Image: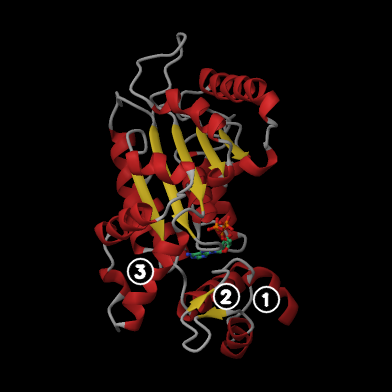
Amino acid sequence: EPVTGAVIGLLAVAGGGYFTWKSLSPRNECNEKGRLDIKALQADLENRVFGQHLAKGITLRGLSGFLRNKNPRKALAMSFHGSTGTGKNYISQIIAQHLYPDGMKSRYVHQFVATLHFPHIQHLDTYKDQLQQWIRRNVTDCKRSVFIFDEVDKMHPGLIDAIKPYLDYYEHIGGVDYRKAIFIFLSNTAGEVISKLALDFWKAGKVREDIKLSDVEHQLSLSAFNKKESGFWHSSLIDRNLIDFYVPFLPLENQHVRMCIKREIMDRGLLVDDELVSKVANDMTYYPKDEQGFSVKGCKVVSTKLGYYL
Ligand SMILES: Nc1ncnc2c1ncn2[C@@H]1O[C@H](COP(=O)(O)OP(=O)(O)OP(=O)(O)O)[C@@H](O)[C@H]1O
């Protein structure tokens, strides 16, 4: 008998509050219809992801719009950009958990880490073939497959080209329809540009939440124009024919790091102690050196640092 994600989510909440998600899709079943409790996803993003008003808004609207459409004309392709530890993997995991009860462990959620696949140029065609077969196999198994490509900026341009047909407007390729699949690309591309914009806002005493997507896009096009070598992923992003949503992740301030620490303490079933939170937060590195505005590694090492002080 299938156990629903909602039940598992509830049990997990009762057992320590770690998981707040609930997936509407039965376990071990392809969620072809794209069932998603949008309110629950919104609540999870609000409660667990800090300092990312743009990323939360864009992913939520992008995903719900895509899933509402019974006959999408192309697969959903979202490209997450930002510096390390700002939540790119984290939001991908939350999305995966809301679509599939087993989240990243689900047989319908697939992760590809680009740096593990660095083909020598003479083997490129074999790698391309393997990558395409992998996508074909998984989408044949389940149309609503989720693919997460990590470190896509380090991926060989030939491999990126190999993915492109699946993001395009074809009704089918070789008899397989890819248009219900979800592709999420993660990269540090443009991380510096996004961080600089956030820093300028911060220095000018402006409200962070007033940063708009258009501000980021404007900065990005300027920097691409000025830079001789903008990476392949960056330039194909600027063309943006196949990427539906460009999702910037802002650098995290001390206040966000503190929220991450508090959440981590609560997830471990412990009581929040402000002194402990300060100790961990002060142990992180911030930039610029004089103003100590943003955390160099975002919230990435929070968990390890907390372990050290406990
Ligand atoms: N904005 C955030 N809000 C809450 N927690 C966060 C946030 N960003 C990061 N974290 C925490 O830090 C951990 C590491 O972040 P994550 O793996 O998402 O970073 P990333 O942006 O994917 O970095 P990288 O580019 O190095 O892969 C997450 O598992 C999460 O616990």
Res 39 visible: yes
User: Looking at this view, is 188 or 102 the one in front?
Assistant: 188
Q: Quadrant of ligand 1?
A: bottom right
> Considering only vertical position in the picture, is 231 above or below 283?
above
Query: In the image, what residue type sits under mark 1?
Result: Leu
The residue singled out by tag 2 in the image is 261
Q: Secondary structure at mark 3?
A: helix
The residue singled out by tag 3 in the image is 197
Select label 3 or label 2 by which is in front. Answer: 3
Q: CA distance from mark 3 to mark 1?
A: 30 Å
- Quadrant where the image shows the N terminus: top right
The answer to whether marks 2 and 1 mark residues whose Cβ atoms lie closer than 8 Å is: yes
Q: CA distance from mark 2 to mark 1?
A: 7 Å
- At x 62%, y 60%, the residue is 15
Q: Image quadrant of residue 274? A: bottom right
- At x 53%, y 85%, the residue is 289
> Considering only vertical position in the picture, is 61 above or below 142?
below
